[in-house]
Structure formats: C-alpha cells, structure tokens
C-alpha cells in the first residue's frame, strides 16, 4: 500500500542522517514524502503548511539526534519550550490527528524522558523507537521500511473494518427494483437497497433475472447468482 509520510527533524541536529533516510525511502517510489521547506511553496505560511501536511499524512517519522532536545534559539532558550517551534507543532498536530508516530534515533541519540518534553508531546515517550546507525545503515533502514509497510497494512485493515461497521449500522430503505448493465448482461435486483451518491453499497436481495454468475453491485459488494436467484452477498 502506498501512503503519505511526514519526516520531522532539526537541521542543526540531524540533517545528514535525515537526508540519507529520505533518499532511501524516496528511492522506493512508493510514498509521498513531506520534508520541510522542499515541500512548501514560496509565500506560503509555514505553520499552516506544516499543519496541513501533517494532517494529510498516515505516518510521521520524527528523527531524533543527540541535540534534538537541547538546541537553543538566539536568546539561549530551548527551542522545544517555544509553543511556535516547528518540531513541537508537527508533533502536537500528529498527536491531535492520531497519526502514527515512529521515532528514529540517529547518531547514538537516546529517547527523551518524560520530564524532558512539553506537556502536549509527552506521549512521544510511549512510542517504540528504531535506532539507525552509520555502521549498519542499510540494515537499520530496512527495518524502518518494514515498520512503515506493516503500519500501512494495519491502517488499510482498520479502514476496511470501519467501513464494515459503518454500513452494518445502516437501516434498509423501502423495497425497490433496479436493473444494472454488467459484462454478462442485464441484472435486475429486487429487494431493499441503501445508496450513497447514487451507488448501491448494500442490498438485501430477494431475486433477479440475471444468468448465473458473480456481479458487482456497488462499493465492495458482490452478489452470486445461481438458478436465477441471489444465493450470496459478499462484502470485500
């Protein structure tokens, strides 16, 4: 499954390692990857662009180097303590949107402790991290790729289950009869239908005039016909 990935990092902390990781993920041509200024248009509001990009992503990879926590601004204040810090905004948006967050430790960095983090991003400490070293870069990045792939499978499975639960709670409408053109010929469905955007998504079928076969009647719904009667409906 393809998907969107947001890479969160500090240039002063891990630009080199992040560049290598980005190049490896981008080489696969499977994912749409957002990584700082390269994906922001000229004249666009940085904060709005970051929040919008994070909300569109399925996974946020936060790359943590040795100075990720302690880097300060020109006044000597720790950047992470500033509510307008880009990294903090990225993580807060991801947590609010329930985006999957994968911490990646580089340059022998350690995961932050609870007291190290502002209140809104403290849940970061509960995320299982992947360590990527220079000595085993290819092996470690392959572990990251596998974690990404597994996450997208979980997301897809979860979306299918959500669709099933959503449609199972719908109430059937009044009985109707409708005829549909298929590759095998005309299929007439007699029963109770539910439609969304004029597409049948679920039907309680009593019979039809179609030859034996298998017919798609709507979004992920199929019927099997035998001896002129609907014998099975399937949600895929």
Image (cartoon, rainbow, N blue to C red):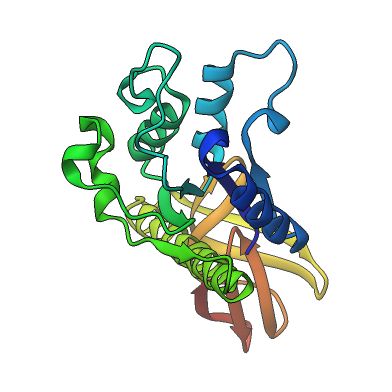
Measured from the top left, where is residue 78 in percent x and y?
34, 24
Q: 217 left or right of 201?
A: right
Residue at image coords 49%, 59%: 202
Measured from the top left, where is residue 182 in percent x and y?
78, 67
Q: Nearer the viewer, residue 16 or 49?
A: 16
Residue at image coords 24%, 45%: 123
Measured from the top left, where is residue 113 in percent x and y?
21, 47
Measured from the top left, where is residue 21 in percent x and y?
63, 56
Residue at image coords 47%, 25%: 86
Quarter-wise, where is residue 229 in the image? bottom right
Figure check: 8 above or below 178: above
Check the picture and name the quadrant holding the N terminus.
bottom right
Q: Nearer the viewer, residue 229 or 152?
A: 152
Figure check: 204 above or below 227: above
Q: Which residue lies furthest to the left in this view?
A: 115
Q: 148 left or right of 162?
A: right
Q: 107 left or right of 35?
A: left
Figure check: 109 above or below 116: below
Please give the count of numbered marks on the rendered protein. 0
Residue at image coords 54%, 71%: 140
Q: Which of 18 and 210 is in front in this view?
A: 18
Q: 41 left or right of 122?
A: right
Quarter-wise, where is residue 215 in the image? bottom right
Quarter-wise, where is residue 227 in the image? bottom right
């Amino acid at each position: 499954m393809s998907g969107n990935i947001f890479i969160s990092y500090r240039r002063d902390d891990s630009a080199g390692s992040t560049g290598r990781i980005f190049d490896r993920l981008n080489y696969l041509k499977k994912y749409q990857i957002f990584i700082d200024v390269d994906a922001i248009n000229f004249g666009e509001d940085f904060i709005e662009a970051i929040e919008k990009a994070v909300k569109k992503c399925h996974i946020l990879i936060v790359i943590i180097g040795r100075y990720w926590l302690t880097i300060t601004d020109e006044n000597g204040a720790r950047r992470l303590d500033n509510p307008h810090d880009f990294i903090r905004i990225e993580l807060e948006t991801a947590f609010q949107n329930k985006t999957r967050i994968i911490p990646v430790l580089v340059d022998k960095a350690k995961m932050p402790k609870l007291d190290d983090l502002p209140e809104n991003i403290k849940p970061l400490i509960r995320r299982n991290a992947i360590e990527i070293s220079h000595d085993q870069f290819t092996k470690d990045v392959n572990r990251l790729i596998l974690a990404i792939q597994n996450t997208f499978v979980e997301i897809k499975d979860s979306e299918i289950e959500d669709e099933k639960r959503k449609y199972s709670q719908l109430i059937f409408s009044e009985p109707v009869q409708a005829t549909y053109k298929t590759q095998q010929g005309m299929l007439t469905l007699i029963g109770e239908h539910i439609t969304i955007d004029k597409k049948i998504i679920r039907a309680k079928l009593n019979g039809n005039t179609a030859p034996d076969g298998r017919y798609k009647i709507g979004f992920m719904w199929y019927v099997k016909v035998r001896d002129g009667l609907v014998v099975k409906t399937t949600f895929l």
